[in-house]
Amino acid sequence: MEKTSYGTVYKAKIAVGGTIALRLLREGTCKERGSCLPVIQQLGRVRHENLVSKAFYQGRRREKLLISDYFSHKNLYELLHDIYMNWINILIAS
């Protein structure tokens, strides 16, 4: 889907329905597991209607995945400036 300085983002459909975004963190990101894991765990515990839930997984081969709900807009700017966006959605997002 997209390559960033942190890694590659993949869009995946899950068996129970829905779509998620998988960010495979590139090698060298969070070199030491303890350097970013506490921050990611804290983000995963935050629950708010305006924030995307995140989860973290580290595989056997030390690959690191950041998992979140998938949204069709890439970022907040695109969400707020979509020409098809109606004012109800804009008010809900703010």
Image (spheres, rainbow, N blue to C red):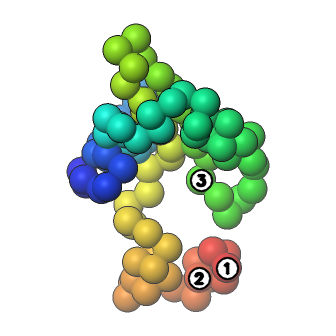
Looking at the image, is 45 positioned above or below residue 71? Answer: above
- In the rendered image, which residue does mark 3 sit on? 52
Label 3 to label 1, Cα distance in Å? 14 Å
Q: Position of residue 63 (x, y in %)?
A: 37, 25
Foreground label between 1 and 2: 1
Looking at the image, is 53 positioned above or below residue 91? Answer: above
**Disc 1 residue type?**
Ser
Q: Position of residue 79 (x, y in %)?
A: 46, 75
Is mark 1 in CB contact (under 8 Å) with mark 2? yes
Of 20 and 5, nearer the camera is: 5
- In the rendered image, which residue does mark 2 sit on? 90
Is mark 3 in CB contact (under 8 Å) with mark 1? no
Q: Position of residue 11 (x, y in %)?
A: 32, 43
**Disc 3 residue type?**
Val
Few, some or many C-alpha atoms within 10 Å of disc 3 (few <14, some 14-19, many ≥20)?
some
- In the rendered image, which residue does mark 1 sit on? 94
